[in-house]
Image (tube, grey):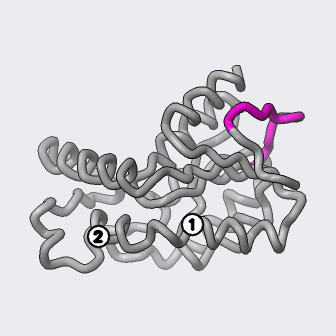
Amino acid sequence: MPLLEATDRLAEPPRSVLVAGTSGAGKSTLAARLAGVFGLEHVEIDGLFHGPGWAPRPEFVADVERFSSRPGWVTEWQYHTVRPLLAGRADLLVWLDYPRHVVMRRVVARTVRRRLRNEELWNGNRERGLLRVLVDRDHIVRWAWRTHAATPKRVAELLELRPELRVVRLRSPSECEAWLAGLG
């Protein structure tokens, strides 16, 4: 199946949706919006993965197995341990294929906002300060920069394995908004 673009319409509503993209692109925000549009449950995968102190939760894979075996869900396509499981159960993948400068602007703004507001994220965790980008190799800003090129490769590999999977490729926030407007 060819990649669908922002102007393409879905022939039928999906039952299980993945949102792919670089950290900071807006996967969770879009996943929540799609859950509302399609009347599906949104499961924020970061909340399942991160335990207190940013430690991975031991129940993570079992939790993903449990929710993804149910009908009707939307989540983000990340974490290598569960990507194949989720990809095998999804009937739609929405790919936020945004340019690096867009993603970096978003991830920096989000990090600063979360720090200034001292927002609790998942299981008591809070965003690490932006200055930690200088010393922490895995700081979310450095992570987004370093992993930006990984998603296109993952999507290509997935399409080799599942050529029937519907994949909508959105190349900018304005394309995303146009596609969403066409769903309603």
Residue 151: mark: 1
Question: Image quadrant of residue 39?
Answer: top right
Q: Is residue 133 magenta?
A: no
Distance of label 1 from label 2 (alpha carbons): 16 Å
Q: Residue at x 38, y 48 (%)?
A: 102
Point out residue 166 in the picture as x, y percentages from the top left corner.
81, 51
Q: Is residue 10 left or right of residue 144?
A: right
Viewer-nearest residue: 43 or 123? 43
Viewer-nearest residue: 178 or 113? 178
Q: Residue at x 73, y 74 (%)?
A: 157
Between discs 1 and 2, the one toward the N terminus: 2
Mark 1 lies on a secondary structure that is helix
**Badge 2: how crowded within 10 Å, few (<14), some, or many (20+)?**
some
Mark 2 lies on a secondary structure that is helix
Viewer-nearest residue: 109 or 58? 109
On the image, numbered disc 2 is attached to which residue? 142
Q: Is residue 157 left or right of residue 60?
A: right
- Residue range of the region highlighted in magenta in the rendering: 6-16
Decide: marks 1, 2 in contact (CB < 8 A)?
Answer: no
Residue 170: mark: none
Q: Is residue 102 left or right of residue 112?
A: right
In the image, residue 113 above or below residue 55: above
Looking at numbered disc 1 in the image, what kind of residue is underneath it? Answer: Thr
Q: Is residue 85 left or right of residue 174?
A: right
